[in-house]
Image (cartoon, rainbow, N blue to C red):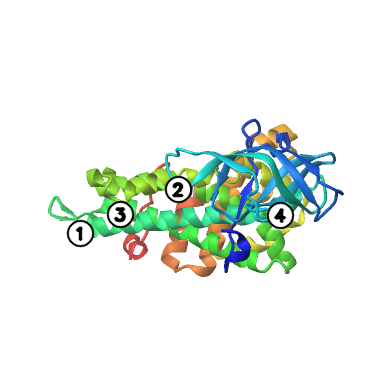
Amino acid sequence: IPATQKRGVTFGMGMTEKQGGSDVRANTTRAEPLTTSGSGELYELIGHKWFLSAPMCDAFLMLAQTTNGLSCFLVPRWRSDGTKNPLELVRLKDKMGNVANASSEVELRGAHGWLIGDEGKGVRTIIEMVAMTRFDCMIGSAAGMRQAVVQAIHHSQHRQAFGRTLVDQPLMSNVLADLALESEAALTLTMRMARALDNQDQPHEQALARLAVAIGKYWICKRTPQHAYEAMECIGGNGVMENCMMPRLYREAPINAIWEGSGNIQCLDVLRAIEKQPETLEAYFAEVGLAQGQHSALDRSINQVHKWFGQRLSADERQSQARRIVDQLAVTLQGALLLQHAPNAISDAFCVSRLGADWGQNYGTLPIGINRQAIID
């Protein structure tokens, strides 16, 4: 149905092509003006998109090459004369997860689209939508963590083994508390980014969002697959049965880490933002500084971040260490936010376990002295 006959419309985004992947500047789809060139003018697009999710949308923002470089276009499903725009859906992707969100391959055979922004400024034009979809990935992964924790705790509260419920057994309570900490930290960072994105008219919020959305998208989405697996293991054999929701959560977990830029892309984007917009790092330090002095582990972590950016590293050296840098940025920011907004039992446990020197490699390695029951409750 044409958008003019609907009460609301949906928009999608088409960037990725088979030969380029995340390197969108390698895109080969061409766009030629039908009459005059320039912002708001109609162009004809010929080429393809390798991943086009939500293909039922009424229009799509797409990147295509013009004589002045990669540009952004609004491509509708229907032309203004009432005929269908020639976007041919070749097939739906057979994905391991995220099946409810259809992804397709599409060929553009003379599709019409309006130029958005200036020619050659396509990435800059579409980046706002990319930031929002990266934030969507944070939301989805944080929600998946929360659902996984709910399933694991509910099962452990009702399952008995060796004379008592699983939740009352020390090692299982350590695992559950650790999973809950991860979920709480992910949700807290996600909600902080929601506030930043809602208030981008404020310089601090805009700068923080530019940097920390990429940090959060990398870290939260990267942590989710192992989190889902550990929650599945808490349920045991029933957790791998298809009539349990855990297999779907497990298959869904890796998707957001790849969508909208994989882990390496996010980390390199963090470095790029800091290099080109130094105010983003200033906003980061201002944000974590709000909790400085509240926990010694956080203070040490903030100092470590300062040391990272005080080192004289070559571009290659800095890139090779990008994941270590962003890991530290992520847990430091999460710790600072939890100290400001979470109960003491949660914020203290997070800082001791994530910012301390003996952070275990798996969930369930919280040190002695953590109030596990308070976290689970």
Residue underneath mark 2: 224
Name the kind of residue labelled 1 in the image. His
At 28% from the left and 50% from the top, the residue drawn is: 244
2 or 4: mark nearer the eye: 2
Q: Pointer 4: residues within 10 angstroms few (<14), some, or many (20+)?
A: many
Query: Residue at coordinates 57% horizontally, 69% vertically from top-left?
Result: 7
Asked if the residue under mark 3 is in contact with the one under mark 2, i.e. CB atoms within 8 Å, the reply is: no
Task: Rate crowding at label 3 as few (under 14), some (14 to 19) or many (20 or more) other CA atoms within 10 Å.
Answer: many
Is residue 358 shown left or right of residue 311? Answer: left
Q: Camera-side residue: 355 or 83?
A: 83
Residue 230 placement, left or right of 13: left
User: Could you say where residue 253 lies in the image, as x and y percent from the top left?
Assistant: 44, 46
- Please tell me which of labels 1 and 3 falls first in the chain: 3
In the rendered structure, find residue 158 and report the number of the disc placed on it.
1
Q: Which of marks 1 and 4 is nearer the N terminus?
A: 1
Say which amino acid is labelled 4: Leu
What residue is shown at x 65% (from left), y 30% (from top)?
A: 19
Q: Describe residue 370's horizontal placement relative to residue 290 as left or right.
A: left
Looking at the image, can residue 300 be seen? no
- The tag earlier along the polypeptide, 3 or 4, is 3
Residue visible at 54% across and 68% down?
A: 340
Q: Which amino acid does label 2 sit on?
A: Thr
Q: Mark 4 points at which residue?
A: 281
Earlier-in-chain disc, 2 versus 4: 2
Q: Distance between the residues labelled 1 and 3?
A: 10 Å
Q: Earlier in the sequence, mark 2 or mark 3?
A: 3
Task: Tell me which label, 2 or 1, sits earlier in the chain.
Answer: 1
Query: Residue beneath label 3, please?
Result: 152
